[in-house]
Image (tube, grey):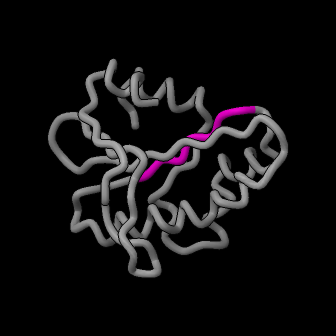
Amino acid sequence: MVSTLRDAGYNLQTNVVVGRSPDGSQFRAKIAASYGEGPALILSGHSQRRRGTTENKIPWEAISISSAIDSSKDRYSRGYIVLAGSGWTLKDFFVRGGLEQYMKGVDLVKIITLDDFMERVQTRTL
């Protein structure tokens, strides 16, 4: 993800404190990216090759990114969680926005596939 964003001209910071988690602790983004002027984006990527527990972490990450955006004083406008690999059982649920009906505020966080991420970076529609 980092090289794709850099190649497209995004300014990046990695492992950077971007705001607060719901429990009040500092939230570190795997990637904070900006393009031009305006608020930056918070990005996180997860890969799952076999069925496992990675997808159980996605709801908490969405909540934490949303909380960080809210506490960032308009430095960040949106978050993305990028899912890669074929081992997901809930990928379609996440990508369709399934968390939004259960969790307030996660509409600031878009969960997308790696292919969708690549296309959005290339077309500058993140």
Q: Which residue is at a point 15% across and 41% down the rendered structure image?
A: 37
* The stretch drawn in magenta includes residue 91: no
Q: Which residue is at a point 46% across and 30% down the rendered structure image?
A: 1
Q: Position of residue 115 (x, y in %)?
A: 59, 26
Q: Which residue is at a point 24% across and 34% down the rendered structure image?
A: 11
Q: Quadrant of the C terminus?
A: top left
* Magenta stretch, overall SS: strand
Q: Is residue 81 above or below residue 84?
A: below
The number of discs equals 0
Q: Is residue 116 above or below residue 15?
A: above
Residue 27 found in image quarter: bottom left
116 vs 9, left or right, is right
Q: Which residue is at a point 77% across and 35% down the rendered structure image?
A: 49
Front one among 81 and 2: 2
- Residue lying furthest bottom in this view? 23
113 vs 7, left or right, is right
51 vs 66, left or right, is right
Residue 74 found in image quarter: bottom left
Q: Is residue 76 above or below residue 33?
A: below
Q: Position of residue 75 (x, y in %)?
A: 22, 58
- Which region shows up in magenta? 79-85
